[in-house]
Image (spheres, rainbow, N blue to C red):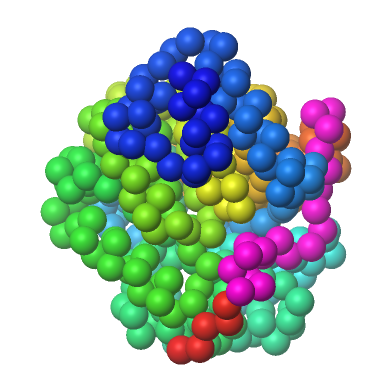
Amino acid sequence: MRIVIDRLRDKQTLSVEEYRELLACTDAEVTNYLHDEARKVTLSRFGNRIYIRGLIEISNCCRNNCLYCGIRKGNVNVERYRLSKSIILDCCAKGYALGFRTFVLQGGEDVAETDDWVEDIIASIRAAYPDCAITLSLGEKTRDAYLRFYRAGANRYLLRHETFDALHYRCIHPKEMSIENRLQCLQWLKEIGYQIGTGMMIGSPHQTIDHLVQDIKYIERLHPQMIGIGPFVPHRDTPFGNEQPGSVEMTLKLLSVFRLMNPDALIPATTALATLDKKGREHGILAGANVVMPNLSPRADRKKYELYNDKAFLKAEAAEGLSMLRKQLAAIGYEVAVDRGDYQHINNRQTKSV
Ligand code: SAH
C-alpha cells in the first residue's frame, strides 16, 4: 500500500481500483503513513500556517428538504432567522478587527433573499473591505445570479456536490433536486471565474466505498481550489435522525488522499469533524488540512443554524475563541495565517474575464 501512497503523492492520481483498496485498508501503519505524507506535502506548500475564514450564517430559511439537513424546509422545530444587511456588516467589522480577511456567507436557499439583495450585500462588503476575500455558500442559483454576485465582488463559492452517484444523490435528497443541476452549477461557477470548492459528507446514509471513489474521481477531474469534507452527523428532526454518524477515521483518510491528489488545495478541518471528536480539528490538520472556519455569526443565532445535532459553535469554533484556536494550533506546531490565503497557482496564472 505504501507504494500506492507514494504514487498518489508523486503523480497525484490513482486508478479506481487503487483508490478503493486504499480506502478499504484498515491497517494503522498504512493510515499513519498516508497522514504523514499528506502532512509533509501541506507543510512543503504552505508551511505551518493555517488559514482562517470567518463564517457568517446569514439565514437558516431553506426551500429545500435535504433528508440529512437540520434546517430542511420540513423541520417545523427550527426557529427561523435571517440576518439583516446591517447585522451582516457588523459581523464583518467584528471579524476584520479579529484579523479575518475572508468572509464566508453561508445559508439555506432562502427565497426571501433575492438576487438583488445578495448582490447589494456583496457590493457593500466589497466596498468596505477591498482587501478581503468574499466567499459564498448559498446553494444552487441561476448562472445569471452567480455572474452578478461575481461582478459585485464575490471571489469564491463553496458548493459541495454531496455525492456524485446519481442514485445515491436521490437517496439523500428530495426528488426536485438532482446531481445534474448541482454539477451544472459548479461548472458555471468555474467558468465565471470563481475559486470553487466542492466536497461531500463522509458516511452519509447508504454511502459505499464505491461512491466515495466516484467522488474522488470527480474531484480529480474538476480540480477545485477548495475541497470541503466532514463526517455526516445525524440531526434528530430529520428522516436520518436515527442513522449512525460518519467515521472520523475515514474522513481523516480522505483529507489525506485529497491533499496528495491536489497539493495546492485549500482544505478545511471542518466543524463536523470537530463536533464528533474534540481533537478533530487538530487531527484534520495533522492529516493535511490547512484551513479552519470559525463562526462569526451573531451568538444568539448560532444555535439556530443547527445542520446536525450538537453542532459545535463555542470555544475554538467561535471567532471570539481565536486565542484558544491559536493555542490549540501552537500545541501541534502550527500558527494562524493572517493573509487572505487565495489559491496561489490559479491566482498567479489566470484572471479570467467574464
Ligand atoms: N445551502 C447551502 C449550504 C448548505 S450547509 C448549499 O446547498 O450549499 C453546508 C454543508 O453542510 C452542506 O453542503 C452539507 O454537506 C453539510 N451538512 C448538512 N447537513 C449535514 C449533516 N447532517 N451532517 C454533516 N454535514 C451536513
Q: Is residue 345 magenta?
A: yes
Task: Give the quarter of the image for residue 217.
Answer: top left
Question: At x 26% / y 32%, what residue is drawn?
Answer: 210
Q: Nearer the viewer, residue 239 or 4?
A: 4
- Answer whether residue 140 is visible to the viewer in this image: yes
Question: At x 49% / y 36%, what residue is drawn?
Answer: 8
Q: Is residue 37 magenta?
A: no
Q: x%, y% of residue 105?
A: 56, 65
Q: Nearer the viewer, residue 150 or 7?
A: 7
In magenta, the rendered stretch is: 331-349
Q: Nearer the viewer, residue 320 or 276?
A: 276
Q: x%, y% of residue 142?
A: 31, 78
Q: x%, y% of residue 66?
A: 28, 49
Q: x%, y% of residue 284?
A: 62, 33
Q: In this rendering, would 68 be left or right of 350?
A: left
Q: In this rendering, would 175 be left or right of 88?
A: left
Q: In this rendering, would 126 be left or right of 275?
A: right
Task: Give the quarter of the image for residue 91.
Answer: bottom right
- Answer whether residue 322 is visible to the viewer in this image: no
Question: At x 56% / y 25%, what residue is drawn?
Answer: 34
Count every numbered label the image shows and give the total. 0
Q: Nearer the viewer, residue 118 or 11?
A: 11
Question: At x 59% / y 47%, what residue is drawn?
Answer: 263
Q: In this rendering, would 285 be left or right of 337?
A: left
